[in-house]
Image (tube, rainbow, N blue to C red):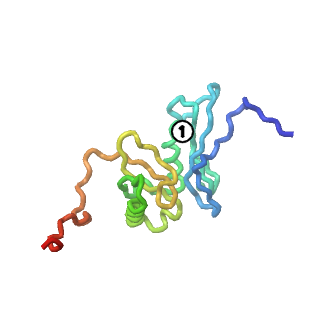
Amino acid sequence: MTTLSLTPDLPPDVLPSPDTPPAPDGTCRAGVGWQYRPDDVPMEPTEDEPFHLRYRSRCSGCGHTGPARSRENRAAEDACDHAYPGWRDMPVMEYRPYEGKKARARWEAAARAVYPEGWFERGGPVREYRTGCGMRHVPKYAPGGGYCMAVARPKRMPAPDPAAAPARGVQESLFG
Ligand SMILES: [Zn+2]
C-alpha cells in the first residue's frame, strides 16, 4: 500500500528539470535539477543566498550531480563544465533571433561555422551576447538543443571585420 506524505521529513531528491534532454546513448549531457530547501535545512557552503529553491547540475548520461547552488545559472555552468569542457572558450554569437525561421537558420549556420564539428550534435552549449536583465542561461536554445549561455555584452565591442560585413551599396547598374 502506498502512503503519500505532504510533509516529508527530508527534502525530496533533486528533481530533474523538464528541460533536461534525455541521453539514451549514455553520453554526458548538461541538465539542471532543483530541490526545495525547508527553513530547518541548512544552506550548503556552495550556496550564497538563503533561497528556498536550490539547483544542482545533473547529468542524465552518467548520473553525475553537482554542488547545490542558489542560482540556476551557476548550476547550468556546472553542468556545462561537466559535460562540455572548454565551452567557456567557445565563440560568442549575437543573440538568437526571437522569431523568423530564416533569421534563426542564418544564426544557426553562423554558430555551426565557428564551433567545432560535432559540438552541437553532442548537445553542446552556444554562447551569446545579452544585455539588460535577460541573462538566464536558456536550455534547448543552442542549435543542437543544448544550453544557450548568456554572456554580458561588453560596453566596447571590437570593431567588426569589414570583410565579413554584407554589402549594402546601391547597385547603380540596376537603375542606369
Ligand atoms: Zn556525465
Q: From the image, which quarter does the C terminus lie in?
A: bottom left
Between 16 and 70, the one nearer to me in the picture? 16
Q: Secondary structure at mark 1?
A: loop
Between 62 and 139, the one nearer to me in the picture? 139
Between 62 and 111, the one nearer to me in the picture? 111
Residue at the image position 52 percent from the left and 58 percent from the top = 145
Q: Is residue 68 above or below residue 128?
A: above
Residue at the image position 39 percent from the left and 39 percent from the top = 133
Q: Is residue 63 above or below residue 111?
A: above
**Which kind of residue does numbered mark 1 sit on?**
Arg
Horizontal and vertical percent position of residue 52: 58, 31
Q: Is residue 29 above or below residue 121?
A: above
Horizontal and vertical percent position of residue 118: 49, 67
Q: From the image, which quarter does the N terminus lie in?
A: top right
Which quarter is ligand 1 in? bottom right
Residue 113 placement, left or right of 158: right
Read off the residue under disc 1.
69
Residue at the image position 68 percent from the left and 34 percent from the top = 11
Horizontal and vertical percent position of residue 161: 24, 61
Residue 37 placement, left or right of 105: right
Horizontal and vertical percent position of residue 71: 50, 38
Q: Residue furthest left?
A: 176
